[in-house]
Image (spheres, grey):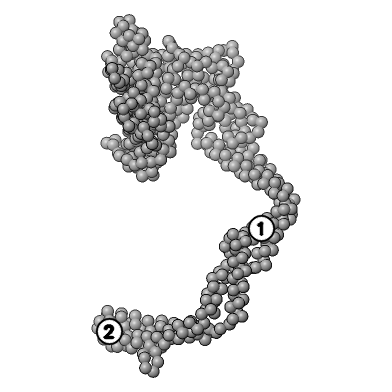
């Protein structure tokens, strides 16, 4: 849940510090006072789009800081620590996450989590764990098939999600098989040209027959043949240095003599014994090197014909590499691939039948997974419809019936083999129709609330925060009271923040925050503050009548607060 919120220089808000508690919090204020900016601050913490034009006049940067409190084993903790951020633990053993967002007037916005700069995607992923935001745009979106399908799938538990994941895998496999078939059919149309190209490639490589490592071997051999005299001299000097002669003692003898001399004194001195042993090893190693050098010297003979052959072979290999633009390993790999492709082209029908069989199997598997997913959706649809209908009855739509239609689609899609439609019969005598055709704005608000409350009931997380932006649009009177009561019930389960114009809704809040616009001759600023009981009554009176000092409105406001308290 959101514990602390700090806003600086955002829109008309110069400075605001809020402590948000458990339960339902109402956010109210006159039109243009800055409620939108208060909501915008939360959306910025959720990774929403930053708008430099929202930086307060006279300031260079706007900032929002939020403190979230979650269970220590929440996936949000793993997300933040995985991004390099730090987590505090409070006295109750709960994790405290610090999030901030900075929006400069010029340049890109910056996001921070746990004191560490993070990609915006980290805040967006965090929001998925701790926030759900609903506004009027979401009500419009609820009319779309995609949103309705997502809501129904969200209502399902872990087993349903597994069915959906299985279908998605089957969909990917089906698309891959289809793409391979289409690609092969396309290639078959150009098989003649492709066959000639593949045959030419194979023939060209086979004419040269390059081998991996051959080039390095030829280069070394050529170097020896081109430098016979110099190498002979170098080898002779090496042999002399190691073996010595009648006048000069070689390195082998020197090491051996030194080793024997030190060994006579090493019986009582471990360090001298170790040096003696090392010198003896050096003598042996030098002797082995001398033997190898003598072997090289014996094999070293001038061979102009062999040298010419090497130059011709290297030129042949270099020419092949330049023609194909590859090194030898790549050429050999390309030749192997070409041989496989040529075999497929040479016997296209066999491979074509194989690909068609793969597509048929993938399609059969896809439909099987689709049927399992569809069966689960149909079962969920009945339960969801029943629960949402019950919620609507409690929201002053006592004769309404909410249904979820799940029918087989004409063809599979990435999301299943079903067409899903949310339908509403507002009255007992009316036939159910799609939401987009039958639900008014006020009805859509209540359907959204009923649906969200129902979805929240599926293993609700007490640390989750629901934010409703004017979800009460288009309603009033007793209906508004029922909406306020239901929002308060949701607030009893998890933190709920409601931006509202209705006193009937705000009266049910456990906490009340007001956004006031204060203007002077030069500038307009906004004050954001929490209200006590007396101030709440005045604010509700203003919302009811436009005049906070109206005696009748104050009386009505007091009655609303009393009724809300009694219903809890």
Asked whether 559 or 26 is in front, the reply is 26
- Name the quadrant of the C terminus: top left
Q: Is residue 443 above or below residue 3?
A: above
Q: For the residue labelled by badge 2, is the local secondary structure a helix, a strand or a loop?
A: loop
Instruction: Give the image quarter of residue 133.
Output: top left
Instruction: Give the image quarter of residue 536.
Output: top left
**Of the image marks 1 and 2, the number of the one nearer the N terminus:** 2
Residue 182, percent from left and from top: 68, 44
Residue 432, percent from left and from top: 59, 17
Asked if residue 518 lies left or right of residue 209, the reply is left
Residue 275, percent from left and from top: 30, 80
Asked if one can make out residue 389 in the rendered structure from this viewpoint, the answer is: yes
For label 2, the crowd category at 10 Å Cα-Cα, with few meaning under 14, some 14 to 19 and many 20 or more, is: some
The residue where tag 1 is placed is 338
Q: Residue at x 57, y 62 (%)?
A: 327
Q: Is residue 8 above or below residue 227?
A: above
Asked if residue 63 lies left or right of residue 363, the reply is left
The residue where tag 2 is placed is 266
- Name the quadrant of the N terminus: top left
Asked if one can make out residue 66 in the rendered structure from this viewpoint, the answer is: no
């Amino acid at each position: 849940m959101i514990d602390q919120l700090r806003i600086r220089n955002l829109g008309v808000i110069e400075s605001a510090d809020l402590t948000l508690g458990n339960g339902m919090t109402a956010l109210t204020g006159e039109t243009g006072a800055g409620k939108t900016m208060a909501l915008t601050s939360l959306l910025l913490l959720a990774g929403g789009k930053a708008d430099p034009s929202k930086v307060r006049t006279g300031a260079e940067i706007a900032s929002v800081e939020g403190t979230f409190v979650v269970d220590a084993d929440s996936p949000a903790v793993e997300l933040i620590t995985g991004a390099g951020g730090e987590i505090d633990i409070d006295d109750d053993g709960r994790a405290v996450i610090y999030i901030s967002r900075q929006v400069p007037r010029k340049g890109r916005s910056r996001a921070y989590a746990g004191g560490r700069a993070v990609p915006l995607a980290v805040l967006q992923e965090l929001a998925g764990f701790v926030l759900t935001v609903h506004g009027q745009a979401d009500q419009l979106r609820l009319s779309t098939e995609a949103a309705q399908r997502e809501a129904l799938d969200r209502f399902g538990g872990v087993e349903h999600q597994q069915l959906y994941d299985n279908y998605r895998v089957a969909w990917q496999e089906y698309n891959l098989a289809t793409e391979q078939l289409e690609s092969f059919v396309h290639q078959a149309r150009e098989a003649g040209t492709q066959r000639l190209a593949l045959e030419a490639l194979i023939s060209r490589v086979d004419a040269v027959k390059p081998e991996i490592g051959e080039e390095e071997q030829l280069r070394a051999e050529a170097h020896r043949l081109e430098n016979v005299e110099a190498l002979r001299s170098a080898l002779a000097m090496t042999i002399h240095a190691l073996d010595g002669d009648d006048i000069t003692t070689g390195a082998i003898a020197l090491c051996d003599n030194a080793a024997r001399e030190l060994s006579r004194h090493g019986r009582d001195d471990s360090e001298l014994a170790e040096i003696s042993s090392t010198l003896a090893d050096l003598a042996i190693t030098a002797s082995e090197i001398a033997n190898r050098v003598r072997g090289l010297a014996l094999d070293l003979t001038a061979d102009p014909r062999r040298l010419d052959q090497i130059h011709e072979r290297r030129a042949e290999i270099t020419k092949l590499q330049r023609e194909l633009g590859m090194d030898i390993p790549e050429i050999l790999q390309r030749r192997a691939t070409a041989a496989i492709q040529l075999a497929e082209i040479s016997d296209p029908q066999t491979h074509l039948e194989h690909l068609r069989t793969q597509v048929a199997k993938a399609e059969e598997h896809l439909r099987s997974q689709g049927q399992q997913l569809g069966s689960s959706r149909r079962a969920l649809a009945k339960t969801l419809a029943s629960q949402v209908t019950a919620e609507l009855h409690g929201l002053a739509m006592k004769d309404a019936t909410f249904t979820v239609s799940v029918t087989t689609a004409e063809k599979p899609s990435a999301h299943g083999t079903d067409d899903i439609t949310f339908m509403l019969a507002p009255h007992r005598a009316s036939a159910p129709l799609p939401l987009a055709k039958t639900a008014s704005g006020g009805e859509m608000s209540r359907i959204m609330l009923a649906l969200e409350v129902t979805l929240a009931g599926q293993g609700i997380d007490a640390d989750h925060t629901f934010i409703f932006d004017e979800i009460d649009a288009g309603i009033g009177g007793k209906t508004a009271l029922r909406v306020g009561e239901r929002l308060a019930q949701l607030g009893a389960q998890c933190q709920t923040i409601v931006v509202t114009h209705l006193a009937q809704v705000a009266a049910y809040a456990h906490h009340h925050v007001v956004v006031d616009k204060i203007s002077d001759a030069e500038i307009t600023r906004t004050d954001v503050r929490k209200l006590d009981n007396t101030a709440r009554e005045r604010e509700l009176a203003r919302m009811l009548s436009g005049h906070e000092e109206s005696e009748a409105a104050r009386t009505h406001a007091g009655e609303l607060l009393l009724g809300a308290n009694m219903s809890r």
